[in-house]
Image (cartoon, helix red, strand yellow):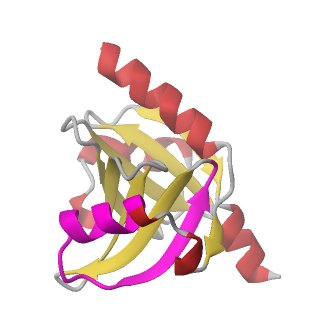
């Protein structure tokens, strides 16, 4: 329970900032070194800054993946794209009940170094974050997708 509260608090803080794409030259050497150590040989396709943290996007086994680091290069978590059908039934049930007729566009699995697991489901430009049991933790509008529409 304590870990869940800490993760939720960290997620709320980092989630309150919008990601900004940055050049690789703006990423601290410690972060780039950690990325290479954690995911050797995988080329980063995009770097983003989210508040004080850095996010590397890359392909791993043909699956879109991202890793989040603090400024010292400590891995805070990974997010891996999954098929919507891989979401727990409790999450799809949530949308059937609370957002009838709305389709889940994208889904991902978020894993923290502690092993804590969350799921993310995108519906109509909003990301819904669930715990490993399928309980809704929060939702946040995806500003990046809003900007893409402009």
Q: Quadrant of residue 50?
A: bottom right
Choose top left, top right, bottom left or bottom right for residue 42. bottom left
Where does residue 98 sit, x and y in percent of width and height?
Answer: 54, 42
- Extent of the magenta region: 30-51
Q: Relative to 146, is 122 on the left or the right?
A: left
User: Which residue is at 25% across, 65% downward?
Assistant: 85
Determine if residue 29 is in view.
yes
Left/right placement of residue 10 relative to residue 15 reads left
Image quadrant holding the N terminus, namely top left
Left-right relation of 15 to 18: left
119 lies left or right of 103: left
Q: Residue furthest right?
A: 150
Up-down relation of residue 141 to residue 24 (above or below) = above
Q: Is residue 84 visible?
A: no
Q: Position of residue 100 (x, y in %)?
A: 54, 53
What percent of the width, then of the height, locates residue 135? 38, 31
Quarter of the figure with the C terminus: bottom right
Residue at the image point whose x is 45% and y is 48% from the top: 70
Q: Nearer the viewer, residue 96 or 16?
A: 16
Residue 35 is inside the magenta segment: yes
- Give the image quarter of residue 63: bottom left
**Residue lying farthest to the front in this orientation:** 29
Q: Nearer the viewer, residue 86 or 3?
A: 3
Q: Is residue 149 magenta?
A: no
């Amino acid at each position: 329970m304590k870990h869940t509260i800490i993760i939720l608090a960290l997620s709320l803080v980092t989630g309150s900032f919008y990601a900004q794409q940055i050049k690789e030259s703006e990423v601290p050497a410690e972060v780039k070194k950690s990325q290479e150590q954690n995911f050797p040989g995988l080329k980063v396709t995009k770097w983003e800054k989210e508040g004080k943290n850095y996010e590397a996007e890359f392909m791993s086994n043909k699956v879109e993946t991202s890793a989040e680091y603090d400024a010292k290069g400590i891995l805070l978590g990974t997010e891996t794209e999954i098929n919507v059908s891989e979401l727990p039934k409790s999450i799809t049930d949530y949308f059937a009940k609370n957002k009838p007729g709305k389709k889940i566009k994208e889904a991902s699995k978020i894993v923290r170094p502690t092993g804590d697991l969350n799921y993310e489901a995108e519906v109509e430009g909003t990301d819904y974050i669930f715990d490993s049991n399928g309980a809704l933790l929060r939702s946040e509008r995806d500003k990046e997708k809003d900007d893409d529409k402009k």
